[in-house]
Every structure is written in structure tokens, then in C-alpha cells.
Image (tube, helix red, strand yellow):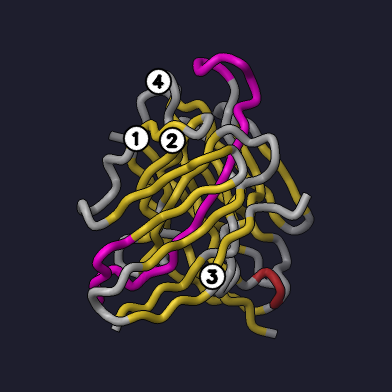
């Protein structure tokens, strides 16, 4: 398997512009996660999906951030309008629960290479 | 709320100088504790999952151990290629629980 694929790898944009980050999870994985990583705050969970449905978006910092998962093999994270404080590395990860029950099994998350976003 | 604290923040070792990284956690029932390795400019790479106190797992020069309050990542006779940031994360057992990550330990192994 090719692993989690993210694009673009680097994005430089100006404040106020719209930014769209893309992710293709590992085939067969039913959970997809979007994270943001900064030196100050480490890895922060923004939102996650189960079977293409958003489950928890409490980590999304503001209404400027939105995420969609139109099908099992594609997700986007959009920032509109972008601000300099959004500069960070954004990771997508996917996982598959090892058991059919939410009360059993663990969830090893596999990460993509990330998108380094710089907002000027 | 689940919490993970990793120490030290950074560690510099000479090649062959063994040491340990610490991950202290609080969680309302542990489903799993995860160790990841992250190289500069790359995404975290999965290393181990530990499920219960007393469990140990090994991979090459790395050995992870788990108690009820903390986990250690022991690095035996490290090589420069072991240089990376090591991340620890916990998953609780209340329904579906996401991973809570620590901020990591940056390890530099000098030749």
C-alpha cells in the first residue's frame, strides 16, 4: 500500500487567501484524522471522520477552518481566509479499528508526510 | 481529560551511549499507549503499541516498557540514524477515544 498521501507538500500563500489541503487515506481504513503540528503546541487533533462522517470537530480552531470527506478515499481541509497564525504543518492520518466494537480493539494511526503551510 | 508528558524535551547522546526516554500519562482507563518516531520533514512513523502494565516490546535497539503511570523507551547502543523526535500517545477506553499526544523528545545521537 502507498500509505497516506497528502498534497501539496508545501504551500505558501498570502493572508486572506483560501487554502485547500488534500488527503488520501490508506485503502480499507475507516477513520481519518486531521492534525496540526507546531513547535509550541505539538500535535493537535483538528477533526476526525468515521466512515466519511465527521464525528468530532471540537479541535477546529475557528469557523475559518472546514473539512470534508466526500468518499472513503479523499478528504480536504480548507482554510478561508488564511492568516499568518495558521502557519504550521498539517498532517492527515488514517486507522482501522482492530475489532468491530467501539469498546474493543485499538487504533494505530498511520500518518501522511504532511503539508507545510506558510501564510505570509 | 487525558494528558501525556514526555521528558526530557531534548537529549543528546554519543553513539553507543544507552539511555531512556520517559512518557508519563493520565487517562481514565488505558486502551493503548503508542510510540512513534518522527524524522524532520516527515510524518510520525508508528513503532509500538503497549496495552497493559508490565508489557514490553522490542525493535532493533529500541525497547518500550509500560507501567500504570508511565512508559519508557529504552535505547541501547544508539547509532546516529536513531536521531529523531520520539512521540508518545495514549488512547482511553471510553467508547471511541482518539489519541492524545505528548510533545515529544528530540534525540540527537552524535558519532
Estimate how packed mark 4 is, as few (under 14), some (14 to 19) or many (20 or more) residues with alpha carbons within 10 Å. some
Measured Cα–Cα span from mark 2 to mark 4: 10 Å
Residue A9 position within the rendered picture, expressed as x and y whole percent measured from the top left = 55, 72
Measured Cα–Cα span from mark 2 to mark 3: 26 Å
Measured Cα–Cα span from mark 2 to mark 1: 10 Å
The secondary element bearing badge 3 is classed as loop
Question: Image quarter for residue B54?
Answer: top right
Q: Nearer the viewer, mark 4 or mark 1?
A: 1
Kindly identify which chain the residue marked by label 2 belongs to.
B
The residue range painted magenta reads A79-104
Please tell me if label 2 and label 3 are on a single chain.
Answer: no
In the drawing, what numbered circle is on residue A8? Answer: 3
Please tell me if label 3 and label 1 are on a single chain.
Answer: yes
In the drawing, what numbered circle is on residue B98? Answer: 2
Q: Is residue B20 above or below residue B94?
A: below
Estimate how packed mark 1 is, as few (under 14), some (14 to 19) or many (20 or more) residues with alpha carbons within 10 Å. some
The secondary element bearing badge 1 is classed as strand
Q: Is residue B37 visible?
A: no
Q: Identify residue for label 4.
A: B94
Task: Identify the residue at horizontal 56%, vertical 42% (top origin).
Answer: B34
**A5 left or right of B5?**
right
Q: A41 or B82: nearer the eye?
A: A41
Farthest residue to the left: give it: A62
Q: Is residue A54 above or below residue A100?
A: below
Measured Cα–Cα span from mark 4 to mark 1: 15 Å
Q: Nearer the viewer, mark 2 or mark 1?
A: 1
Amino acid at each position: 500500500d502507498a500509505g497516506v498521501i497528502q498534497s501539496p507538500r508545501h504551500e505558501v500563500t498570502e493572508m486572506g487567501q483560501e487554502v485547500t489541503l488534500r488527503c488520501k487515506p490508506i485503502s480499507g481504513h475507516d477513520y481519518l484524522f486531521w492534525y496540526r503540528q507546531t513547535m509550541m503546541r505539538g500535535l493537535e487533533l483538528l477533526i476526525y471522520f468515521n466512515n466519511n462522517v465527521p464525528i468530532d470537530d471540537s479541535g477546529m480552531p475557528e469557523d475559518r477552518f472546514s473539512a470534508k470527506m466526500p468518499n472513503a478515499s479523499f478528504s480536504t481541509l480548507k482554510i478561508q481566509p488564511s492568516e499568518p497564525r495558521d502557519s504550521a504543518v498539517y498532517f492527515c492520518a488514517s486507522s482501522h479499528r482492530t475489532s468491530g466494537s467501539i469498546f474493543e480493539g485499538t487504533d494505530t494511526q498511520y500518518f501522511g508526510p504532511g503539508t507545510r503551510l506558510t501564510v505570509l | 481529560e487525558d494528558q501525556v508528558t514526555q521528558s526530557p524535551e531534548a537529549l543528546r547522546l554519543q553513539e553507543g551511549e544507552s539511555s531512556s526516554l520517559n512518557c508519563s500519562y493520565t487517562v481514565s482507563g488505558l486502551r493503548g499507549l503508542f510510540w512513534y518516531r518522527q524524522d524532520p520533514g516527515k510524518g510520525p512513523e508508528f513503532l509500538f503499541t503497549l496495552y497493559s502494565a508490565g508489557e514490553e516490546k522490542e525493535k532493533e535497539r529500541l525497547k518500550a516498557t509500560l507501567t500504570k503511570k508511565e512508559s519508557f523507551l529504552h535505547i541501547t547502543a544508539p547509532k546516529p540514524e536513531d536521531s529523531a523526535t520520539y512521540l508518545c500517545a495514549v488512547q482511553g477506553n471510553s467508547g471511541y477515544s482518539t489519541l492524545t499526544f505528548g510533545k515529544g523528545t528530540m534525540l540527537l545521537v552524535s558519532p
